[in-house]
Protein backbone atom coordinates (compact mmCIF):
# COMPACT_ATOMS: atom_id res chain seq x y z
CA UNK A 1 0.00 0.00 0.00
CA UNK A 2 1.38 3.34 -1.01
CA UNK A 3 0.01 6.43 0.67
CA UNK A 4 0.44 9.90 -0.68
CA UNK A 5 -0.32 12.37 2.10
CA UNK A 6 -0.68 16.11 1.54
CA UNK A 7 2.05 16.03 -1.09
CA UNK A 8 3.04 19.27 -2.81
CA UNK A 9 5.82 19.79 -5.30
CA UNK A 10 7.52 23.05 -6.20
CA UNK A 11 10.05 23.53 -8.93
CA UNK A 12 12.29 26.53 -9.30
CA UNK A 13 12.00 28.35 -12.58
CA UNK A 14 14.19 31.44 -13.01
CA UNK A 15 14.05 32.19 -9.30
CA UNK A 16 10.28 31.70 -9.45
CA UNK A 17 8.84 28.77 -7.57
CA UNK A 18 5.96 27.17 -9.35
CA UNK A 19 3.63 24.65 -7.80
CA UNK A 20 3.42 21.50 -9.87
CA UNK A 21 1.50 19.32 -7.42
CA UNK A 22 -0.91 20.78 -4.93
CA UNK A 23 -1.75 18.98 -1.72
CA UNK A 24 -2.33 15.52 -3.19
CA UNK A 25 -3.91 12.79 -1.12
CA UNK A 26 -4.34 9.28 -2.40
CA UNK A 27 -3.84 5.67 -1.40
CA UNK A 28 -2.71 3.10 -3.95
CA UNK A 29 -3.92 -0.21 -2.59
CA UNK A 30 -2.30 -3.60 -2.91
CA UNK A 31 -2.92 -5.69 -6.02
CA UNK A 32 -4.89 -2.97 -7.78
CA UNK A 33 -4.32 -1.50 -11.19
CA UNK A 34 -4.62 2.25 -11.44
CA UNK A 35 -4.59 4.47 -14.44
CA UNK A 36 -3.69 8.10 -14.13
CA UNK A 37 -4.83 10.29 -16.94
CA UNK A 38 -5.27 14.00 -17.57
CA UNK A 39 -4.02 16.82 -19.77
CA UNK A 40 -0.45 17.41 -20.81
CA UNK A 41 1.38 19.20 -18.06
CA UNK A 42 -1.18 18.09 -15.48
CA UNK A 43 1.49 16.64 -13.18
CA UNK A 44 1.31 12.91 -13.94
CA UNK A 45 5.01 12.33 -14.54
CA UNK A 46 5.81 14.58 -11.60
CA UNK A 47 3.76 12.37 -9.32
CA UNK A 48 5.55 9.30 -10.67
CA UNK A 49 8.90 10.96 -9.97
CA UNK A 50 7.79 11.80 -6.45
CA UNK A 51 6.95 8.13 -5.94
CA UNK A 52 10.33 6.99 -7.29
CA UNK A 53 12.23 9.60 -5.26
CA UNK A 54 13.48 11.53 -8.28
CA UNK A 55 11.67 14.64 -7.07
CA UNK A 56 11.47 15.57 -3.40
CA UNK A 57 8.13 16.94 -2.25
CA UNK A 58 8.02 20.42 -0.72
CA UNK A 59 5.41 19.18 1.72
CA UNK A 60 3.72 15.97 2.70
CA UNK A 61 4.68 12.36 3.32
CA UNK A 62 4.97 9.19 1.29
CA UNK A 63 4.27 5.98 3.17
CA UNK A 64 4.97 2.49 1.81
CA UNK A 65 3.38 -0.31 3.82
CA UNK A 66 3.50 1.82 6.94
CA UNK A 67 7.11 2.92 6.41
CA UNK A 68 7.72 6.64 5.91
CA UNK A 69 9.92 6.76 2.80
CA UNK A 70 9.67 10.52 2.20
CA UNK A 71 13.40 10.97 2.77
CA UNK A 72 14.53 7.78 1.07
CA UNK A 73 16.64 8.23 -2.05
CA UNK A 74 16.03 6.58 -5.42
CA UNK A 75 18.21 3.53 -4.74
CA UNK A 76 16.59 2.87 -1.38
CA UNK A 77 13.14 3.02 -2.88
CA UNK A 78 14.18 0.75 -5.74
CA UNK A 79 15.39 -1.77 -3.20
CA UNK A 80 12.07 -1.57 -1.37
CA UNK A 81 10.30 -2.60 -4.55
CA UNK A 82 9.30 0.58 -6.34
CA UNK A 83 9.95 0.79 -10.09
CA UNK A 84 9.32 3.47 -12.68
CA UNK A 85 9.30 3.09 -16.45
CA UNK A 86 10.24 6.51 -17.79
CA UNK A 87 8.13 8.46 -20.21
CA UNK A 88 11.34 9.25 -22.08
CA UNK A 89 13.83 6.49 -21.34
CA UNK A 90 17.53 7.37 -21.59
CA UNK A 91 19.81 5.67 -24.07
CA UNK A 92 23.17 4.21 -23.09
CA UNK A 93 26.21 3.92 -25.32
CA UNK A 94 27.92 0.57 -24.99
CA UNK A 95 25.35 -1.04 -22.69
CA UNK A 96 23.53 -4.03 -24.12
CA UNK A 97 19.90 -4.87 -23.52
CA UNK A 98 21.07 -8.03 -21.76
CA UNK A 99 23.16 -6.00 -19.33
CA UNK A 100 20.41 -3.52 -18.58
CA UNK A 101 17.88 -6.28 -17.92
CA UNK A 102 20.39 -8.11 -15.74
CA UNK A 103 20.86 -4.99 -13.64
CA UNK A 104 17.09 -4.61 -13.51
CA UNK A 105 16.60 -8.19 -12.32
CA UNK A 106 19.12 -7.63 -9.52
CA UNK A 107 19.60 -10.60 -7.18
CA UNK A 108 17.17 -12.62 -9.20
CA UNK A 109 19.20 -12.15 -12.41
CA UNK A 110 20.35 -15.77 -12.64
CA UNK A 111 16.87 -17.13 -12.44
CA UNK A 112 15.29 -14.53 -14.65
CA UNK A 113 14.20 -15.56 -18.10
CA UNK A 114 15.39 -12.59 -20.11
CA UNK A 115 14.02 -14.01 -23.33
CA UNK A 116 10.57 -14.42 -21.86
CA UNK A 117 10.77 -10.92 -20.52
CA UNK A 118 11.40 -9.49 -23.97
CA UNK A 119 8.65 -11.62 -25.44
CA UNK A 120 6.26 -10.18 -22.85
CA UNK A 121 6.88 -6.75 -24.26
CA UNK A 122 6.60 -8.02 -27.80
CA UNK A 123 10.25 -8.16 -28.80
CA UNK A 124 12.05 -11.13 -30.26
CA UNK A 125 14.75 -11.87 -27.73
CA UNK A 126 17.29 -13.23 -30.17
CA UNK A 127 17.29 -10.02 -32.09
CA UNK A 128 17.49 -7.72 -29.10
CA UNK A 129 19.47 -9.15 -26.18
CA UNK A 130 22.80 -8.27 -27.74
CA UNK A 131 21.81 -4.91 -29.12
CA UNK A 132 23.06 -1.80 -27.43
CA UNK A 133 20.55 0.46 -25.71
CA UNK A 134 21.81 3.35 -27.80
CA UNK A 135 20.63 5.58 -30.58
CA UNK A 136 20.20 2.62 -32.91
CA UNK A 137 17.00 1.46 -31.19
CA UNK A 138 13.75 2.88 -32.48
CA UNK A 139 11.54 4.87 -30.12
CA UNK A 140 9.05 2.04 -29.74
CA UNK A 141 11.77 -0.56 -29.15
CA UNK A 142 13.29 1.62 -26.46
CA UNK A 143 9.92 2.03 -24.73
CA UNK A 144 9.38 -1.72 -24.72
CA UNK A 145 12.82 -2.40 -23.27
CA UNK A 146 12.09 0.26 -20.65
CA UNK A 147 8.94 -1.63 -19.70
CA UNK A 148 10.90 -4.87 -19.50
CA UNK A 149 13.33 -3.30 -16.98
CA UNK A 150 10.40 -2.65 -14.68
CA UNK A 151 9.01 -6.15 -15.11
CA UNK A 152 12.36 -7.87 -14.58
CA UNK A 153 11.75 -8.62 -10.94
CA UNK A 154 8.95 -8.94 -8.51
CA UNK A 155 8.11 -5.49 -7.20
CA UNK A 156 5.49 -3.92 -4.99
CA UNK A 157 4.77 -0.81 -6.99
CA UNK A 158 5.33 -0.47 -10.74
CA UNK A 159 4.68 2.85 -12.44
CA UNK A 160 4.54 2.96 -16.24
CA UNK A 161 4.62 6.40 -17.79
CA UNK A 162 2.69 6.41 -21.06
CA UNK A 163 3.74 2.89 -22.06
CA UNK A 164 1.65 3.07 -25.21
CA UNK A 165 3.62 5.99 -26.66
CA UNK A 166 5.36 4.85 -29.80
CA UNK A 167 3.87 1.35 -29.65
CA UNK A 168 2.13 0.32 -32.82
CA UNK A 169 -1.56 -0.48 -32.76
CA UNK A 170 -1.03 -4.10 -33.57
CA UNK A 171 0.91 -4.68 -30.33
CA UNK A 172 -1.64 -2.96 -28.21
CA UNK A 173 -3.70 -5.99 -27.35
CA UNK A 174 -0.58 -7.87 -26.29
CA UNK A 175 0.44 -5.02 -24.04
CA UNK A 176 -2.83 -5.17 -22.15
CA UNK A 177 -2.34 -8.89 -21.55
CA UNK A 178 1.16 -8.27 -20.33
CA UNK A 179 -0.04 -5.81 -17.71
CA UNK A 180 -2.71 -8.22 -16.59
CA UNK A 181 -0.22 -11.08 -16.31
CA UNK A 182 2.20 -8.98 -14.34
CA UNK A 183 -0.58 -8.03 -12.06
CA UNK A 184 -1.76 -11.56 -11.49
CA UNK A 185 1.65 -13.19 -11.33
CA UNK A 186 3.24 -10.88 -8.80
CA UNK A 187 0.38 -9.12 -7.05
CA UNK A 188 2.06 -5.89 -8.01
CA UNK A 189 0.28 -2.60 -7.57
CA UNK A 190 0.39 -1.18 -11.06
CA UNK A 191 0.08 2.48 -11.88
CA UNK A 192 -0.16 3.30 -15.55
CA UNK A 193 -0.06 6.85 -16.79
CA UNK A 194 -1.96 6.86 -20.04
CA UNK A 195 -4.21 8.70 -22.41
CA UNK A 196 -5.41 5.50 -24.02
CA UNK A 197 -8.92 4.19 -23.75
CA UNK A 198 -7.88 0.57 -24.02
CA UNK A 199 -5.52 1.03 -21.13
CA UNK A 200 -8.18 2.86 -19.16
CA UNK A 201 -10.31 -0.22 -19.55
CA UNK A 202 -7.75 -2.28 -17.60
CA UNK A 203 -8.04 -0.08 -14.55
CA UNK A 204 -9.63 -0.80 -11.21
CA UNK A 205 -9.63 2.92 -10.64
CA UNK A 206 -8.92 5.89 -12.84
CA UNK A 207 -7.42 9.08 -11.47
CA UNK A 208 -7.70 12.27 -13.43
CA UNK A 209 -4.88 14.66 -12.63
CA UNK A 210 -5.16 18.19 -13.94
CA UNK A 211 -3.38 21.36 -12.96
CA UNK A 212 -1.54 19.57 -10.16
CA UNK A 213 -4.69 18.36 -8.44
CA UNK A 214 -6.72 15.17 -8.40
CA UNK A 215 -9.75 16.22 -10.32
CA UNK A 216 -11.62 12.97 -10.20
CA UNK A 217 -11.26 9.33 -9.21
CA UNK A 218 -13.67 6.98 -10.90
CA UNK A 219 -14.13 3.28 -11.39
CA UNK A 220 -13.48 1.42 -14.59
CA UNK A 221 -17.15 0.45 -14.60
CA UNK A 222 -18.19 4.05 -14.70
CA UNK A 223 -15.66 4.89 -17.33
CA UNK A 224 -16.71 1.92 -19.43
CA UNK A 225 -20.36 2.76 -18.95
CA UNK A 226 -19.69 6.25 -20.19
CA UNK A 227 -17.89 4.85 -23.19
CA UNK A 228 -20.69 2.38 -23.85
CA UNK A 229 -23.23 5.15 -23.58
CA UNK A 230 -21.34 6.78 -26.37
CA UNK A 231 -20.44 9.68 -24.22
CA UNK A 232 -17.75 10.99 -26.43
CA UNK A 233 -17.07 13.69 -23.99
CA UNK A 234 -13.65 14.49 -22.78
CA UNK A 235 -12.28 12.78 -19.71
CA UNK A 236 -8.89 14.25 -19.98
CA UNK A 237 -9.82 17.17 -17.81
CA UNK A 238 -9.77 19.73 -20.51
CA UNK A 239 -12.29 20.68 -23.04
CA UNK A 240 -10.49 19.00 -25.86
CA UNK A 241 -13.43 17.91 -27.94
CA UNK A 242 -13.24 14.18 -27.82
CA UNK A 243 -9.77 13.78 -29.13
CA UNK A 244 -7.60 12.30 -26.47
CA UNK A 245 -7.91 8.61 -25.88
CA UNK A 246 -9.91 7.88 -28.98
CA UNK A 247 -7.16 7.96 -31.51
CA UNK A 248 -6.86 4.22 -31.73
CA UNK A 249 -10.45 3.77 -32.69
CA UNK A 250 -10.30 6.61 -35.16
CA UNK A 251 -7.21 5.30 -36.85
CA UNK A 252 -7.91 1.60 -36.38
CA UNK B 1 63.86 -13.78 -17.79
CA UNK B 2 60.27 -12.64 -17.21
CA UNK B 3 59.19 -12.08 -13.63
CA UNK B 4 55.69 -12.29 -12.18
CA UNK B 5 55.46 -8.51 -12.41
CA UNK B 6 56.46 -8.63 -16.09
CA UNK B 7 53.75 -11.19 -16.72
CA UNK B 8 51.20 -8.97 -15.07
CA UNK B 9 52.17 -6.04 -17.28
CA UNK B 10 52.00 -8.29 -20.32
CA UNK B 11 48.54 -9.38 -19.37
CA UNK B 12 47.36 -5.79 -19.05
CA UNK B 13 48.68 -4.63 -22.41
CA UNK B 14 48.47 -7.69 -24.58
CA UNK B 15 45.93 -9.94 -22.85
CA UNK B 16 48.80 -12.34 -22.59
CA UNK B 17 48.80 -14.75 -19.73
CA UNK B 18 52.02 -16.29 -20.76
CA UNK B 19 54.35 -16.46 -23.73
CA UNK B 20 52.14 -15.79 -26.75
CA UNK B 21 51.39 -18.20 -29.54
CA UNK B 22 52.70 -17.22 -32.95
CA UNK B 23 55.34 -14.63 -33.62
CA UNK B 24 56.38 -12.31 -30.84
CA UNK B 25 59.10 -10.02 -29.64
CA UNK B 26 59.14 -8.93 -26.03
CA UNK B 27 61.20 -5.90 -25.17
CA UNK B 28 62.05 -5.17 -21.56
CA UNK B 29 63.85 -2.09 -20.20
CA UNK B 30 65.30 -1.20 -23.58
CA UNK B 31 66.40 -4.67 -24.68
CA UNK B 32 64.80 -7.55 -26.50
CA UNK B 33 64.34 -10.45 -24.09
CA UNK B 34 62.56 -13.07 -26.10
CA UNK B 35 61.44 -13.67 -29.63
CA UNK B 36 59.69 -16.22 -31.75
CA UNK B 37 59.29 -16.31 -35.50
CA UNK B 38 57.11 -18.52 -37.67
CA UNK B 39 57.40 -19.88 -41.19
CA UNK B 40 55.52 -16.82 -42.46
CA UNK B 41 56.57 -14.13 -40.03
CA UNK B 42 60.16 -13.09 -39.56
CA UNK B 43 61.48 -10.62 -36.98
CA UNK B 44 64.87 -9.03 -37.52
CA UNK B 45 66.73 -6.64 -35.23
CA UNK B 46 67.47 -3.31 -36.91
CA UNK B 47 71.16 -2.57 -37.45
CA UNK B 48 71.16 1.22 -37.67
CA UNK B 49 68.79 2.05 -34.80
CA UNK B 50 66.99 0.37 -31.92
CA UNK B 51 63.97 -1.64 -33.01
CA UNK B 52 62.87 -4.47 -35.21
CA UNK B 53 61.66 -5.26 -38.72
CA UNK B 54 58.64 -7.53 -38.81
CA UNK B 55 58.17 -9.16 -42.18
CA UNK B 56 54.96 -10.94 -42.94
CA UNK B 57 54.93 -13.01 -46.12
CA UNK B 58 52.25 -12.33 -48.70
CA UNK B 59 49.15 -14.48 -48.22
CA UNK B 60 49.75 -15.12 -44.50
CA UNK B 61 46.35 -15.72 -42.93
CA UNK B 62 45.10 -16.09 -39.38
CA UNK B 63 48.45 -15.40 -37.71
CA UNK B 64 49.33 -12.92 -35.03
CA UNK B 65 52.35 -10.92 -33.95
CA UNK B 66 52.78 -9.61 -30.41
CA UNK B 67 55.35 -6.91 -29.80
CA UNK B 68 54.85 -5.76 -26.22
CA UNK B 69 57.23 -3.47 -24.42
CA UNK B 70 57.55 -3.56 -20.68
CA UNK B 71 59.48 -1.23 -18.45
CA UNK B 72 60.02 -1.97 -14.81
CA UNK B 73 62.87 0.37 -13.94
CA UNK B 74 62.79 4.04 -12.99
CA UNK B 75 64.69 6.72 -14.88
CA UNK B 76 64.73 5.01 -18.25
CA UNK B 77 64.07 6.54 -21.64
CA UNK B 78 63.55 4.00 -24.39
CA UNK B 79 63.13 4.99 -28.02
CA UNK B 80 62.33 2.27 -30.50
CA UNK B 81 61.66 2.15 -34.24
CA UNK B 82 59.64 -0.79 -35.48
CA UNK B 83 58.78 -1.44 -39.10
CA UNK B 84 56.06 -3.84 -40.18
CA UNK B 85 55.75 -5.17 -43.69
CA UNK B 86 52.38 -6.86 -44.15
CA UNK B 87 52.61 -8.80 -47.43
CA UNK B 88 49.86 -8.62 -50.04
CA UNK B 89 46.69 -10.60 -49.37
CA UNK B 90 47.46 -11.29 -45.70
CA UNK B 91 45.14 -11.29 -42.73
CA UNK B 92 46.95 -10.64 -39.47
CA UNK B 93 46.53 -9.39 -35.94
CA UNK B 94 49.29 -7.25 -34.52
CA UNK B 95 49.25 -6.45 -30.82
CA UNK B 96 51.62 -3.84 -29.48
CA UNK B 97 51.46 -1.99 -26.26
CA UNK B 98 53.54 -0.67 -23.49
CA UNK B 99 53.29 -1.44 -19.83
CA UNK B 100 55.34 0.64 -17.41
CA UNK B 101 55.89 -0.20 -13.80
CA UNK B 102 57.81 2.72 -12.43
CA UNK B 103 58.88 1.89 -8.90
CA UNK B 104 61.05 4.97 -8.35
CA UNK B 105 60.96 8.73 -8.40
CA UNK B 106 62.54 9.30 -11.78
CA UNK B 107 60.53 9.40 -14.97
CA UNK B 108 60.21 6.37 -17.21
CA UNK B 109 59.57 7.10 -20.83
CA UNK B 110 58.90 5.00 -23.88
CA UNK B 111 58.65 6.46 -27.35
CA UNK B 112 57.61 3.85 -29.86
CA UNK B 113 57.66 4.75 -33.51
CA UNK B 114 55.77 2.20 -35.56
CA UNK B 115 55.72 2.24 -39.32
CA UNK B 116 53.40 -0.11 -41.16
CA UNK B 117 53.23 -1.00 -44.82
CA UNK B 118 49.97 -2.78 -45.48
CA UNK B 119 50.27 -4.13 -48.98
CA UNK B 120 47.56 -4.60 -51.57
CA UNK B 121 44.43 -6.42 -50.44
CA UNK B 122 45.72 -7.08 -46.92
CA UNK B 123 43.73 -6.95 -43.79
CA UNK B 124 45.39 -5.91 -40.55
CA UNK B 125 44.03 -5.39 -37.10
CA UNK B 126 46.40 -3.45 -34.90
CA UNK B 127 45.78 -3.19 -31.18
CA UNK B 128 47.80 -0.85 -29.02
CA UNK B 129 47.29 -0.69 -25.28
CA UNK B 130 48.98 1.49 -22.76
CA UNK B 131 49.25 0.74 -19.13
CA UNK B 132 51.22 2.21 -16.26
CA UNK B 133 51.56 1.51 -12.59
CA UNK B 134 53.97 2.00 -9.71
CA UNK B 135 53.89 3.95 -6.51
CA UNK B 136 56.96 6.17 -6.88
CA UNK B 137 56.81 9.84 -7.83
CA UNK B 138 58.41 9.14 -11.20
CA UNK B 139 56.11 9.87 -14.10
CA UNK B 140 55.12 7.29 -16.66
CA UNK B 141 55.44 8.84 -20.07
CA UNK B 142 54.45 7.36 -23.41
CA UNK B 143 54.77 9.06 -26.76
CA UNK B 144 53.79 6.65 -29.50
CA UNK B 145 53.88 7.52 -33.13
CA UNK B 146 52.13 5.31 -35.64
CA UNK B 147 52.37 5.69 -39.39
CA UNK B 148 50.36 3.37 -41.60
CA UNK B 149 50.43 3.18 -45.37
CA UNK B 150 47.48 1.23 -46.68
CA UNK B 151 47.73 0.12 -50.29
CA UNK B 152 44.81 -0.52 -52.63
CA UNK B 153 41.95 -2.63 -51.22
CA UNK B 154 43.63 -2.91 -47.84
CA UNK B 155 41.58 -2.93 -44.66
CA UNK B 156 43.00 -1.64 -41.41
CA UNK B 157 41.36 -1.74 -38.04
CA UNK B 158 43.15 0.20 -35.36
CA UNK B 159 42.30 -0.05 -31.71
CA UNK B 160 44.01 2.28 -29.27
CA UNK B 161 43.35 1.96 -25.58
CA UNK B 162 44.73 3.82 -22.61
CA UNK B 163 42.88 3.51 -19.33
CA UNK B 164 44.51 5.31 -16.37
CA UNK B 165 48.10 4.70 -15.35
CA UNK B 166 49.92 6.87 -17.87
CA UNK B 167 50.85 10.32 -16.60
CA UNK B 168 51.75 11.90 -19.85
CA UNK B 169 50.96 10.68 -23.32
CA UNK B 170 51.35 12.30 -26.68
CA UNK B 171 50.10 10.11 -29.42
CA UNK B 172 50.46 10.83 -33.11
CA UNK B 173 48.76 8.66 -35.69
CA UNK B 174 49.18 9.26 -39.39
CA UNK B 175 47.50 7.16 -42.01
CA UNK B 176 47.54 7.17 -45.81
CA UNK B 177 44.83 5.37 -47.70
CA UNK B 178 45.16 4.35 -51.33
CA UNK B 179 42.46 3.31 -53.76
CA UNK B 180 39.54 1.51 -52.11
CA UNK B 181 41.38 1.20 -48.79
CA UNK B 182 39.30 1.08 -45.63
CA UNK B 183 40.17 2.31 -42.17
CA UNK B 184 38.38 2.00 -38.84
CA UNK B 185 39.94 3.56 -35.76
CA UNK B 186 38.54 3.11 -32.28
CA UNK B 187 40.16 5.08 -29.53
CA UNK B 188 39.42 4.70 -25.81
CA UNK B 189 41.00 6.95 -23.25
CA UNK B 190 40.50 7.48 -19.55
CA UNK B 191 42.62 9.92 -17.59
CA UNK B 192 42.45 10.74 -13.90
CA UNK B 193 44.43 12.52 -11.17
CA UNK B 194 46.58 15.08 -12.96
CA UNK B 195 47.32 13.01 -16.06
CA UNK B 196 47.64 14.60 -19.45
CA UNK B 197 46.93 12.96 -22.76
CA UNK B 198 47.08 14.27 -26.26
CA UNK B 199 45.99 12.44 -29.36
CA UNK B 200 46.54 13.63 -32.87
CA UNK B 201 45.08 11.62 -35.73
CA UNK B 202 45.61 12.57 -39.33
CA UNK B 203 44.10 10.49 -42.09
CA UNK B 204 44.88 11.23 -45.69
CA UNK B 205 42.40 9.75 -48.09
CA UNK B 206 44.57 9.72 -51.18
CA UNK B 207 42.90 7.02 -53.25
CA UNK B 208 39.58 6.88 -55.00
CA UNK B 209 36.79 5.32 -52.92
CA UNK B 210 38.89 5.13 -49.80
CA UNK B 211 36.92 5.32 -46.54
CA UNK B 212 37.82 6.19 -42.96
CA UNK B 213 35.85 5.99 -39.76
CA UNK B 214 37.20 7.26 -36.46
CA UNK B 215 35.31 6.62 -33.24
CA UNK B 216 36.96 8.18 -30.25
CA UNK B 217 35.54 8.02 -26.74
CA UNK B 218 37.16 9.41 -23.66
CA UNK B 219 36.53 10.08 -20.00
CA UNK B 220 38.42 12.81 -18.17
CA UNK B 221 38.32 12.73 -14.38
CA UNK B 222 39.81 14.70 -11.48
CA UNK B 223 42.28 17.36 -12.67
CA UNK B 224 43.32 15.55 -15.82
CA UNK B 225 43.60 17.14 -19.21
CA UNK B 226 42.90 15.78 -22.67
CA UNK B 227 43.50 17.23 -26.04
CA UNK B 228 42.29 15.81 -29.33
CA UNK B 229 43.15 16.85 -32.80
CA UNK B 230 41.63 15.09 -35.77
CA UNK B 231 42.09 15.82 -39.41
CA UNK B 232 40.61 13.95 -42.32
CA UNK B 233 42.10 15.06 -45.58
CA UNK B 234 40.04 14.06 -48.60
CA UNK B 235 42.22 14.17 -51.71
CA UNK B 236 40.00 12.05 -53.92
CA UNK B 237 36.47 10.73 -54.17
CA UNK B 238 36.25 9.36 -50.65
CA UNK B 239 34.20 9.15 -47.47
CA UNK B 240 35.32 9.96 -43.95
CA UNK B 241 33.57 10.21 -40.61
CA UNK B 242 34.95 11.25 -37.24
CA UNK B 243 32.86 10.82 -34.14
CA UNK B 244 34.40 11.90 -30.88
CA UNK B 245 32.63 11.85 -27.59
CA UNK B 246 34.04 12.85 -24.24
CA UNK B 247 32.61 12.62 -20.76
CA UNK B 248 34.00 15.26 -18.50
CA UNK B 249 33.96 14.97 -14.72
CA UNK B 250 35.24 16.84 -11.68
CA UNK B 251 37.75 19.59 -12.59
CA UNK B 252 39.04 17.97 -15.75
CA UNK B 253 39.58 19.78 -19.02
CA UNK B 254 38.97 18.49 -22.52
CA UNK B 255 39.94 20.21 -25.75
CA UNK B 256 38.77 18.84 -29.04
CA UNK B 257 39.99 20.38 -32.25
CA UNK B 258 38.30 19.02 -35.32
CA UNK B 259 39.46 19.58 -38.83
CA UNK B 260 38.20 18.16 -42.07
CA UNK B 261 39.86 19.15 -45.28
CA UNK B 262 38.28 18.46 -48.62
CA UNK B 263 40.66 18.83 -51.55
CA UNK B 264 38.41 17.09 -54.04
CA UNK B 265 34.91 17.80 -55.21
CA UNK B 266 33.69 14.34 -54.31
CA UNK B 267 35.21 14.13 -50.87
CA UNK B 268 32.49 13.51 -48.31
CA UNK B 269 33.65 14.26 -44.79
CA UNK B 270 31.78 14.50 -41.52
CA UNK B 271 33.01 15.45 -38.09
CA UNK B 272 30.95 15.10 -34.95
CA UNK B 273 32.27 16.07 -31.55
CA UNK B 274 30.57 16.26 -28.20
CA UNK B 275 31.82 16.93 -24.69
CA UNK B 276 29.53 16.72 -21.69
CA UNK B 277 29.01 15.30 -18.27
CA UNK B 278 27.23 12.00 -17.67
CA UNK B 279 23.56 12.52 -18.46
CA UNK B 280 21.63 12.66 -15.19
CA UNK B 281 18.73 10.64 -16.55
CA UNK B 282 21.13 7.75 -17.21
CA UNK B 283 22.20 7.79 -13.56
CA UNK B 284 18.63 8.16 -12.34
CA UNK B 285 17.48 5.26 -14.48
CA UNK B 286 20.17 2.93 -13.15
CA UNK B 287 19.55 4.05 -9.56
CA UNK B 288 15.86 3.35 -10.03
CA UNK B 289 16.90 -0.23 -10.85
CA UNK B 290 18.66 -0.49 -7.50
CA UNK B 291 22.23 0.67 -8.19
CA UNK B 292 23.92 3.19 -5.91
CA UNK B 293 24.99 6.46 -7.49
CA UNK B 294 28.61 5.28 -7.65
CA UNK B 295 27.64 1.96 -9.22
CA UNK B 296 25.45 3.76 -11.73
CA UNK B 297 28.33 6.05 -12.68
CA UNK B 298 30.74 3.12 -13.09
CA UNK B 299 28.21 1.26 -15.22
CA UNK B 300 27.73 4.21 -17.57
CA UNK B 301 31.49 4.81 -17.90
CA UNK B 302 32.32 1.16 -18.42
CA UNK B 303 29.77 0.88 -21.20
CA UNK B 304 30.93 4.11 -22.77
CA UNK B 305 34.54 2.97 -22.89
CA UNK B 306 33.80 -0.54 -24.07
N1 LIG C 1 11.97 20.04 -13.46
C1 LIG C 1 11.01 20.87 -13.87
N2 LIG C 1 11.26 22.20 -14.05
C2 LIG C 1 10.30 23.05 -14.46
N3 LIG C 1 9.05 22.67 -14.72
C3 LIG C 1 8.73 21.37 -14.56
C4 LIG C 1 9.69 20.40 -14.14
N4 LIG C 1 9.08 19.23 -14.07
C5 LIG C 1 7.82 19.42 -14.45
N5 LIG C 1 7.59 20.72 -14.74
C6 LIG C 1 6.31 21.31 -15.16
O1 LIG C 1 5.32 20.75 -14.35
C7 LIG C 1 4.14 20.51 -15.09
C8 LIG C 1 3.75 19.07 -14.95
O2 LIG C 1 4.67 18.28 -15.67
P1 LIG C 1 4.52 16.74 -15.84
O3 LIG C 1 5.70 16.25 -16.60
O4 LIG C 1 4.30 16.12 -14.50
O5 LIG C 1 3.21 16.64 -16.71
P2 LIG C 1 2.44 15.39 -17.30
O6 LIG C 1 1.10 15.36 -16.69
O7 LIG C 1 3.28 14.17 -17.16
O8 LIG C 1 2.30 15.78 -18.82
P3 LIG C 1 2.37 14.91 -20.19
O9 LIG C 1 1.01 14.32 -20.40
O10 LIG C 1 2.67 15.91 -21.21
O11 LIG C 1 3.45 13.91 -20.02
C9 LIG C 1 4.44 20.96 -16.50
O12 LIG C 1 3.94 22.26 -16.67
C10 LIG C 1 5.94 20.96 -16.57
O13 LIG C 1 6.40 21.91 -17.48
MG1 LIG D 1 4.29 12.99 -18.46
Image (cartoon, grey):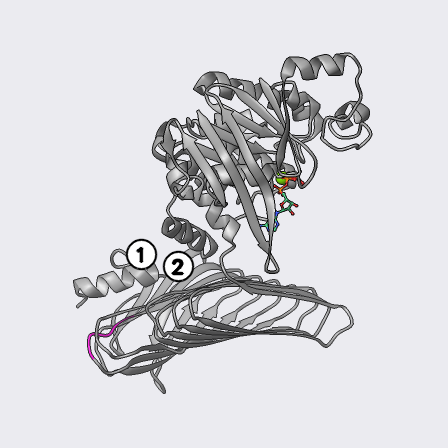
Give the magenta part as a residue range: B100-104
Find out whether the residues at labels 1 and 2 contact each other: C-beta distance under 8 Å: yes
SS class of the residue under badge 1? loop
Q: Is residue A73 visible?
A: yes
Q: Residue furthest bottom?
A: B48
Closest to the observer: B56 or A156?
A156
To which residue does mark 1 refer? B21
Closest to the observer: B154 or B219?
B219
Q: On screen, A120 above or below B94?
A: above
To which residue does mark 2 refer? B64
Closest to the observer: A76 or B149?
A76
Q: Image point 49% across, 29% down: which residue?
A: A158
Q: Image point 69% across, 39% down: which residue?
A: A40
Residue A119 on image: x %, y %: 54, 26
Secondary structure mainly formed by the magenta segment: loop
Local packing at callout 1 (Cα closer than 10 Å; few below 14, some 14-19, many 20+) is few
Q: Earlier in the sequence, mark 1 or mark 2?
A: 1
Label 2 CB-ligand 1 distance < 8 A: no
| Residue B95, image quadrant | bottom left
SS class of the residue under badge 2? strand
Amino acid sequence: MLEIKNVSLDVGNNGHNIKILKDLNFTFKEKKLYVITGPNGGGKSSLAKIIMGIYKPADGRIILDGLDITNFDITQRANLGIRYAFQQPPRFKGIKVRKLLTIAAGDAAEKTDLCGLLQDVGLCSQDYLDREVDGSLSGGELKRIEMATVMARRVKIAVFDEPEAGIDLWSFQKLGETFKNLHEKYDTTIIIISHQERILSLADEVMVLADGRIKEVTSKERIMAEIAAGAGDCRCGQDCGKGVGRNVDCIG
Amino acid sequence: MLTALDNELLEKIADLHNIPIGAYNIRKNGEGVSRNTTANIDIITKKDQPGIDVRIKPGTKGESVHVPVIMSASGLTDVVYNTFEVGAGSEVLIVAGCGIHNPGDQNSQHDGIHHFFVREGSRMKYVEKHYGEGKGKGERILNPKTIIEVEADGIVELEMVQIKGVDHAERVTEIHLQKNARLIITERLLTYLSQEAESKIIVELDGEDSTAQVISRSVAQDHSKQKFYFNLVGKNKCRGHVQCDSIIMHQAKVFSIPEISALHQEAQLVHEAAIGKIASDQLIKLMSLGLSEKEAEDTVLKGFLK
